């Protein structure tokens, strides 16, 4: 097993794992650069992601501003200022949710091959032969993971939303907590890919990252930054899939995952 590829984790959580999580996308990028198959698929994914993110931004910006104007109005100066801020908030919320789902839906056929190729580079893994039954089971498991993840993420936003009504500090607290919430579920999303491939239930993904919260937040924070950096975010999906697979293998090597389900 190439130790230079898979990060080393202890059996128990450590605060220093925050930096291990932050470094996962860099490990993934280095592996993509050294692996022709990963580089080719990542380039295709980047082109599709670029089109999706630019299209979402063009579509959602006027939608967010329009929602704000309907709620606040835009006649008086204070209304225009409030409407602009609220419009950006609506845009950011819609863009985050859409950017975390639309490119992944468009690139779903590439995610499993990227993850399998990453595991093959890690060693001790051979991609199973094609089977319609296996494809259907894997697709259903992945869909279940996606629906559960989106449900929990949106529920968290709804629960945190009333913080915006608290004068002065409410908006700041909302930004901090909602960002941390998004970071955690970003980590869940991309650990879900290899876990779903191996037919591990969604509760194992959440449980593994909840027990190693610094690792999860570090990984999610790195992906969060990539999401908001123009051009760099075009490579979010392939880097995140490869990094999530490296994280899965690291947890597996550290005996930090329960036994896989039976046949």
Image (cartoon, grey):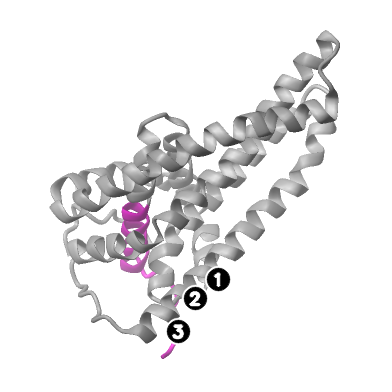
Question: Are discs 1 and 2 less than 8 Å apart at CB?
Answer: yes
Circle 3 residue? 261
Q: Secondary structure at mark 2?
A: helix
Residue at image mark 2:
140
Pick whichever, 232 or 260, lies toward us.
232
Q: What secondary structure is found at the residue carrying circle 3?
A: loop
> Which of label 2 and label 3 is nearer to you?
2
In magenta, the rendered stretch is 241-263
Residue drawn 31% across and 67% down?
253
Residue located 81% across and 17% down the image: 74
- Measured in 3D between alpha carbons, the distance from the residue under mark 1 to the one under mark 2, in whole angstroms, is 6 Å
Which numbered mark, 3 or 1, is in the foreground of this view? 1
Left or right: residue 218 versus residue 239 is right
Nearest to N terminus: mark 3 or mark 1: 1
**For the residues bearing labels 3 and 1, Cβ distance under 8 angstroms:** no
Q: Position of residue 111 (x, y in %)?
A: 35, 60
Q: Indicate the position of residue 76 as horizontal and vertical percent values.
A: 86, 10
Q: Earlier in the sequence, mark 2 or mark 3?
A: 2
Judging by the rendered image, the residue that carries numbered circle 1 is: 144
Label of residue 216 in the image: none
Give the alpha-carbon distance from disc 3 to disc 1, as whole Å: 16 Å
Mark 1 is surrounded, within 10 Å at the Cα level, by few (under 14), some (14 to 19) or many (20 or more) other residues, namely some
- Observer able to see residue 24: no
Judge whether residue 110 can be spotted in this image.
yes
């Amino acid at each position: 097993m190439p130790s230079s590829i898979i990060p080393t984790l202890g059996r128990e959580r450590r605060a220093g794992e925050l930096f291990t999580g932050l470094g996962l996308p860099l490990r993934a990028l280095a592996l993509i650069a050294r692996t022709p198959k990963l580089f080719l698929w990542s380039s295709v994914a980047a082109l599709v992601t670029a089109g999706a993110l630019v299209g979402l931004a063009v579509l959602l910006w006027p939608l967010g501003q329009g929602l704000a104007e309907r709620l606040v109005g835009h006649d008086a100066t204070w209304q225009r200022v409030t409407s602009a801020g609220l419009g950006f908030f609506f845009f950011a919320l819609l863009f985050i949710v859409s950017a975390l789902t639309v490119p992944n839906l468009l690139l779903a056929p590439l995610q499993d091959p990227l993850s399998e190729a990453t595991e093959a580079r890690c060693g001790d893994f051979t991609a199973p032969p094609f089977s319609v039954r296996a494809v259907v089971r894997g697709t259903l498991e992945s869909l279940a993971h996606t629906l559960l993840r989106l449900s929990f993420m949106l529920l968290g936003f709804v629960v945190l939303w009333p913080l915006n009504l608290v004068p002065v500090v409410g908006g700041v607290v909302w930004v901090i907590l909602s960002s941390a919430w998004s970071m955690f579920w970003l980590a869940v999303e991309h650990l879900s890919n290899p876990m779903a491939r191996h037919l591990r239930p969604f509760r194992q993904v959440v449980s593994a990252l909840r027990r190693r919260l610094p690792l999860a937040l570090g990984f999610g924070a790195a992906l969060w930054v990539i999401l908001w950096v123009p051009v760099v975010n075009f490579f979010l999906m392939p880097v995140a899939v490869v990094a999530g697979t490296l994280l899965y293998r690291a947890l597996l090597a550290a005996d930090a995952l329960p036994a896989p389900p039976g046949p």
